[in-house]
Amino acid sequence: MNVDWAAFTPAAGTVGGLLIGTGAVLLMLGAGRIAGISGILGGLFAPERGGGWRVAFLLGMFAAPWLYRLFSALPSITVDASMPRLIIAGLLVGLGTRYAAGCTSGHGVCGLSRGSRRSLAATALFMAAGFATVYLLRHVAGG
């Protein structure tokens, strides 16, 4: 394994983690809601759940890179996957979040911090599936 030391940014990662945690805590204290992105996005399409705070949360997520850009250059992004592979991956992630009753942000950030055993199991399965997928695609399928 090689580490790209130029891209290793522990300070930015720490600040980002603190901002994510602060946002999750503020949403929990202010609205009594879990900051799970799939649930927030999915709730926009369920009229009985209300959408004002959901829209504000999602707009904040999209505004964050623009605010970051005021203080530092955005990192370059390179995607080495084809569009069909990205679409399939996105659909599988969406399907997985439905089966797991939440996504990595809801279970991994908020659920684990609340001591949820269900979130611990879901996060362990997310991670195991990710490890297995990378291993299979890179070492077995030769991708």
Image: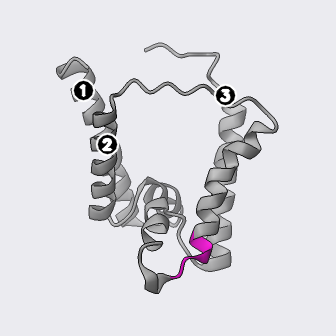
Asked if the residue under mark 3 is in contact with the one under mark 1, i.e. CB atoms within 8 Å, the reply is: no
* Residue found at x 66% / y 61%: 23
Q: In which quarter of the image is the C terminus?
A: top left
Where residue 77 sits in the image (x, y, percent)?
Answer: 54, 28
The amino acid sitting under disc 2 is Ile
- Badge 3 marks a residue whose secondary structure is loop
Q: Nearer the viewer, residue 143 or 109?
A: 143
* Residue found at x 55% / y 76%: 51
Mark 1 or mark 3, earlier in chain: 3
Residues at marks 1 and 3, CA–CA distance in whole angstroms: 27 Å
Can the viewer see residue 106? Answer: yes
Asked if the residue under mark 2 is in contact with the one under mark 3, i.e. CB atoms within 8 Å, the reply is: no
* Position of residue 63 in the picture relative to residue 128 (left or right): right
Q: Identify the mark at residue 87; answer none if there is no mark.
A: 2
Residues at marks 3 and 2, CA–CA distance in whole angstroms: 29 Å
Where residue 138 sits in the image (x, y, percent)?
Answer: 27, 21
Q: Identify the mark at residue 9; answer none if there is no mark.
A: 3
* Residue found at x 27% / y 49%: 92
* Position of residue 77 in the picture relative to residue 21 (left or right): left
**Residue 51 colored in magenta in the image:** yes
Q: Give the range drawn in magenta.
A: 50-54
Can the viewer see residue 128? Answer: no
